[in-house]
Amino acid sequence: MDEEQPHYGLIGQMIAQPGQRAALAGILTEDTDSMPGNFTYLVGEDSANPDALWIVELWADKDAHAASLQLPSVRAAIKKGRPLIAGFGARAEFRPIASPLR
C-alpha cells in the first residue's frame, strides 16, 4: 500500500450540547498532531447549526483509524468530550482518490 496517500476517509457531523460547540471543538483538537497513519484531521463549525461540528479525517487505512481510537490521548479526549455531545448527524466513509493536503 502507498503510505504517502490516504486510503480511508471519514466525514461526520457531531452535535454539541447547546452552547458547548467551542468547548467540544477544543477537546477534539487537542493532541491530534501525532496519530500514526493520519494525514488530515480537521474540525470545523457547521455554518447552519450553531451547535454542530464537522470532522473530516484522512487515514492511511481503516486499521490506522481503528488503532487511533486506542491511543491514550484519543481515549482521554473521548472521555472528556462525551458529556458535551448531544448527538451525531450525517456520517460517511469514503476512499480518497486524491489528496491535495500535506
Image (cartoon, rainbow, N blue to C red):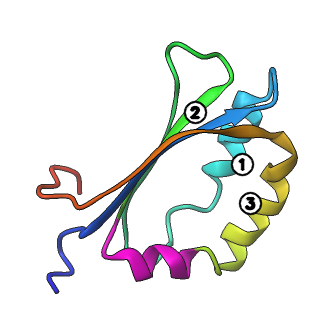
Look at discs 2 and 1 and give the one toward the viewer: 2
Q: Which of the 4 image quadrants contains residue 26? A: top right
Q: Position of residue 75 (x, y in %)?
A: 73, 71
Name the magenta segment's main secondary structure. Answer: helix
Horizontal side of 73 relative to 95 (left or right) equals right
Q: Position of residue 62 (x, y in %)?
A: 39, 75
Residue type at mark 3?
A: Ala
10 relative to 39, above or below: above
- In this figure, which residue is indicated by the disc labeled 3? 77
Check contact, mark 1 vs mark 3: CB within 8 A. yes
67 relative to 39, above or below: below
- In this figure, which residue is indicated by the disc labeled 2? 53
Q: CA distance from mark 2 to mark 1?
A: 12 Å
- In this figure, which residue is indicated by the disc labeled 1? 27
Horizontal side of 93 relative to 45 (left or right) equals left
N-terminal of the two: label 1 or label 3? 1
Residue 65's disc number: none
Look at discs 3 and 2 and give the one toward the viewer: 2
Residue type at mark 1?
A: Ile
Q: Secondary structure at mark 2?
A: strand
Residue type at mark 2?
A: Leu
| Residue range corresponding to the magenta coloring | 59-68
Any part of residue 73 in sight? yes
Q: Secondary structure at mark 1?
A: helix
The residue sitting at 52% across, 13% down in the picture is: 48
The residue sitting at 21% across, 81% down in the picture is: 3
Residue neighbourhood size for the residue with mark 3, other residues' Cα within 10 Å, grouped as few (<14), some (14–19), many (≥20): some
